[in-house]
Image: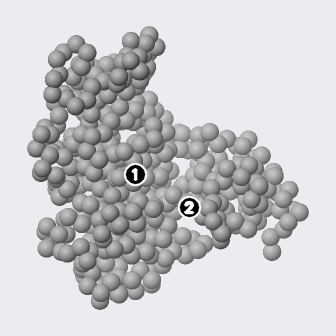
Amino acid sequence: MYWKRYTSEERSSRIQKALHENVDFTNYPSLGYPASKLDGHVFYDDAPFLKDAPILQTYVANPNHIGCHTRGTSVSSFKGTQEMEREVLRVLAEDIFKAEPGAYDGYISPGGTEANIQAMWIYRNYFMRTHGAMSHEIAILASEDTHYSIPKGSNLLQVRWLNIPVDFYTRVIQTDKLDEIIADARLGGIRFFIVIANLGTTMFGSIDDPDIYSNALEKQGLEYRMHVDGAYGGFVYPFSNQRSAINFENEKISSFTIDAHKMLQAPYGTGVFLCRKGLIEYVLTEEAEYIEGMDLTVCGSRSGANAVAVWMILFTYGPHGWFEKISVLQMRTNWLCGQLDKMGVKYFRDSFMNIVTIQAQYIPEDLALKYNLIPQKHAEGNRWYKIVVMGHVEVDDLSAFTDELEVYLKAHPVQ
């Protein structure tokens, strides 16, 4: 509905309009701000190349997107670029994750780690304020493959993390273990659960079925809120699997994390948090009285330039261009898997993802180092190496790797 492909002139014109609507620190007195554009003695705001680089113009202008711009008022001095952030969130929430129009809140976060912590913070406070829960009565449910931001958030929020085992080969949550862990937690006084379902784990690209969690908890009559960590898979899975039901049409899902600095190749420090209406206010910091609007995020001040960068990428490709990009990566990943199959190499790959994780006994360490394969553990006992087929990874690169791997395996067959 909202996602289009714009020409270079249209994109530049839209960014210029937004910057014109923001405060102009150069030409107008702005006496009350503890900030400004980037320092002109260091970052040359009159450099001639800037006129052809609207994103760099935005970084120089240095808009502050503090707050959440999908509800209430916001700092009016940056209303132009705030509107571009809203346009990004509308595309992501409504066009990609199928939210009802306007039925969501969210913001461009400084990364997926904050977005995941934002979700856990919201749901902890939700249970405390609506059910009178104590922190020791709340637990986080997430698989052993989940991102390290979950134990980090558990530590920060002082809410226990229950680590759910997965099958070694399929990376699927072990439902019998899940049932046992929930039952034990219930006996131990846990009454409320924050569920983290993975839409593309960092190491494997594996996909959690949200229904596994919801069925297990509802069977035991327990209260929960579910967050989907799509930091990696959020810009892949909805396009490669167009029958995906992991979106806001699933009423059991309350929020999403997406990382624009992974597949979207936005500047690092660019994540996205999305949630249903009626939730984000549970983390309102009422003491931030000098802020126009509401302080509803972990980070507070954040760069509006990152939101404009995401806007630029989305509207350069458009939905069909992005689908084509993901389709090309899928074909390259399929080619790699075909070569591994011919060699009898064991690996894990979700058929809709562009991550291939190979069992470590097939990969010599020097080959892993040469091709920058990422181990599951940078320590003794590593059992997996992963390959991520990004845009810079072409079939020629994959072919060079598989040719060397084939030579090695012929000389060192795995029993």
Amino acid at dot 1: Gly
Sequence order check: which comes first, mark 2 or mark 1? 1
**Residue where numbered disc 1 is placed:** 112
Q: Toward the viewer: 69 or 316?
A: 69
Q: Identify the residue position indicated by label 2 in the image.
A: 204
Toward the bottom, the furthest residue is 187
Q: Is residue 380 above or below residue 53?
A: below
Residue in the picture at 44% in, 59% down: 199
Residue depicted at x 13% and y 73%: 132
Type of amino acid under label 2: Phe
Choose top left, top right, bottom left or bottom right for residue 75.
Answer: top left
Residue at the extreme right of the image, as rendered: 411
Q: Rate crowding at label 1 as few (under 14), some (14 to 19) or many (20 or more) other CA atoms within 10 Å.
A: many
Q: CA distance from mark 2 to mark 1?
A: 17 Å
Residue drawn where x is 81% and y is 52% of the image: 404
Residue most extreme to the front: 41
